[in-house]
Image (cartoon, grey):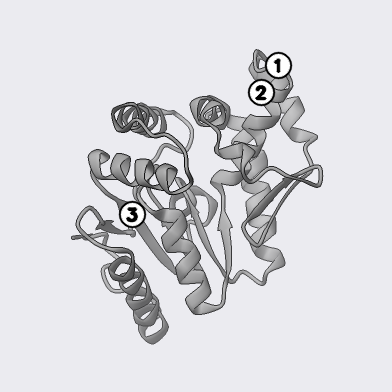
Amino acid sequence: MIIAIDGPGGSGKTTVSRTVAERLELAHLDTGAFYRAATLAVLRAGGDLDNEAIVTLVAGLDLDFDEGVMRLGGEDISGAIRSDDVTAHVSRVSAIRYVRTLMVDHQRAWVLERGNHAVVEGRDIGTVVFPDAEVKLFLTASAEERARRRARDLQDRGMTADKNQILSQIRSRDKADSTRPIAPLRPAEDAVILDSTSLDLDAVVEHVLELVRSCDSSGSPDGSTGPTVG
């Protein structure tokens, strides 16, 4: 079973996906880590590369994601890819058509190596990467709530957080992701849309598990016509 969880930044995809994977004893793939790794490599190369040079660079990268750790050429870059600089530039790199082709190939191969049993999160999993996934969830929340969560996460890690700046970044990323011509951020037609603004982690995870149970019993999850929940 492939469980696809899509949604905008700060919607809780990573925490929910990781928790669901643990509960179901499935592999977990954060596809955004691949794009962030590519972006980090571009920045390390100077950052002012044109699209052709970026594609050439990305095509030669040695990327690996395992147990929540992203590696570039064997180096653990899990922390480095979450920097403000990477966040500010990842939309541009990930919007390049052939970069997305390369990353999708990586992601599909990763899941295939695990017997096509995984929880996969991102922004185009249900629409592009795994359009035939058995369970598809589009997880969202208000921009204000997502900014609050991001600020709290940063503070929990001992970092300073300007909520207004984070809110501005979230809205900018939402616009860039949803309007790009290649694999724009949008729910798959058969995805269940869940607004988690007023829900805690346990409630969201339980909803996903209920979709899985429904799929196991009927072959397709309840709400496969794409209702909005929450």
Q: Is residue 120 left or right of residue 139?
A: right
Residue 136: which quarter of the image? bottom left
Tell me if I can see residue 133 in this picture: no
* Residue visible at 38% across and 48% down in the picture: 7
Q: Are marks 1 and 3 in contact (CB under 8 Å)?
A: no
Q: Which mark is residue 22?
A: none
Helix, strand or loop for disc 1 = loop
Q: Is residue 58 left or right of residue 135?
A: right
Q: Are marks 1 and 2 in contact (CB under 8 Å)?
A: yes
Relative vertical location of residue 106 with respect to residue 163 in this rendering, above or below? below
Q: Name the outermost residue toward the front.
A: 158
Residue marked by disc 1: 46
In percent of width and height, residue 17 lies at 46, 62
Residue marked by disc 2: 43
Disc 1 residue crowd, few under 14, some 14–19, many 20+, Cα 10 Å: few
Q: How many marks?
A: 3
Relative vertical location of residue 59 with respect to residue 194 in this rendering, above or below? above
* Residue visible at 43% across and 42% down in the picture: 154
Helix, strand or loop for disc 3 = strand
Relative vertical location of residue 149 with respect to residue 41 in this rendering, above or below? below
Q: Name the outermost residue toward the bottom.
A: 217
Tell me if I can see residue 139 in this picture: yes
Helix, strand or loop for disc 2 = helix
Residue marked by disc 3: 139
Split into 4 quadrants, where in the image is the C terminus? bottom left
Instruction: In this rendered view, identify the residue nearer to me: 198 or 114.
Output: 198
In percent of width and height, residue 80 lies at 63, 37
Tag 1: amino acid: Gly
